[in-house]
Image (cartoon, rainbow, N blue to C red):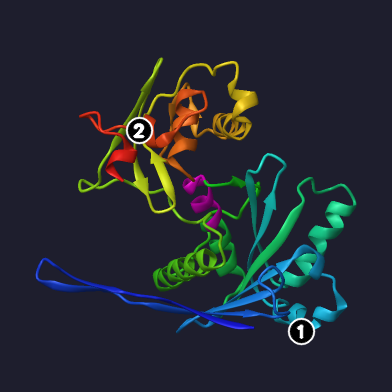
Amino acid sequence: MLTRLIGHGQVGIEKGAISMNHGKTIELFFVNGTADDVVTAELSNWNAQAIRIPRLECRNPKQDHIASAIQGVGVYFLVCQNDGGKEGVYVGEAENIHKRLCDHLREYDGGRETYYWNYAIAFVGGRLDKALIRYLENRLVAILKECGRCDCLTQNTFQNIVLKPSQIATMEEFIDNARVVLSALGNKFLVSQPSITTAMQTFNCVGRDADAKGFVSPNGFTVLEGSRVASSTVESFKSRARGYYELRKRLESDGTIVGCKFARNHEFSSPSSASAVVLGRNSNGNHDWRTVDGRTLGDIQ
């Protein structure tokens, strides 16, 4: 099954010059006819390819054509989902990605690897070599940590890779393209948390000793860095809103919330999940997020 995704560009004028964000076409091929199986993705005018392959298909003899496609030099992501719902991602590089993925499976089977990855996304092509993939791995790990959308499972990378300026520019473009393809495949872990602009409407959530500020963002609601959460949760929070309770605990453990304050912007899937974490209790975000003049988010929307 073949699907083409087309993103539309925008044209604007800035300081007398025309600035254009061109549309992009991504061709997705569902190798076995379903989106949750092997998928290849190709971006127009880019000589690299992404292949999403489920864990169980890595050693499937019926997928020899896929194994052949990822036997080259490239970088890859192992995507894990833990029992608490938090995503973990391992970033790696290899001169033979298929062999390295099989090594990961053997290391897990032998107890030498503790995380269980559900699927891999490999990027091959683009005239990559050992120095370039080491640069990519190092940069991708740094971006993954900076975005803060998942746990980074990679422990060590090669540092101080020496490349020519032209090579660095080409690899940064590779990263930009990989980010677009990953997003098309439903993976946002290389996408920065939304930031606010002067044109955006802000909302406050205040209660007990909580005092937070946020805004409606593309994929939900974003709470701003420096927002204060309630220092404790109510007794019924764990039983009546267990998902939000566990989400708050995760944000405290991964460093998003430190000392009852948001250490960085964080996008929630909904206004209610954001206000529940802030207030430490079950919450209706449409009611508890308010403008400075007292209008609720529900009123605005």
- Mark toward the start of the polypeptide (1 vs 2): 1
Distance from disc 1 to disc 2, alpha carbons, whole Å, reads: 52 Å
Q: Is residue 181 above or below residue 85?
A: below
Q: Residues within 10 Å of mark 1 (few under 14, many from 20)?
A: few
| Amino acid type of the residue that numbered disc 1 sits on in the rendered structure | His
Q: Is residue 212 above or below residue 12?
A: above
| Amino acid type of the residue that numbered disc 2 sits on in the rendered structure | Trp
Magenta stretch bounds = 140-148
Q: Is residue 267 above or below residue 130?
A: above
Residue drawn at (34%, 40%), measured in percent from left and top?
298
Which residue position holds label 1? 65
Q: Residue 168's spot in the image, x, y percent?
A: 44, 67
User: Is residue 146 highlighted in magenta?
Assistant: yes
Q: Main secondary structure of the magenta part?
A: helix
Q: Residue 185's spot in the image, x, y percent?
A: 57, 67
Secondary element at image label 2: loop
Whether residue 126 is visible to the viewer of this picture, yes or no, is no
Which mark is nearer the camera, 1 or 2? 2
Residue drawn at (31%, 46%), measured in percent from left and top?
301
State left or right for residue 293 relative to residue 72. Answer: left
Q: Is residue 203 above or below residue 41?
A: above
Which residue position holds label 2? 289
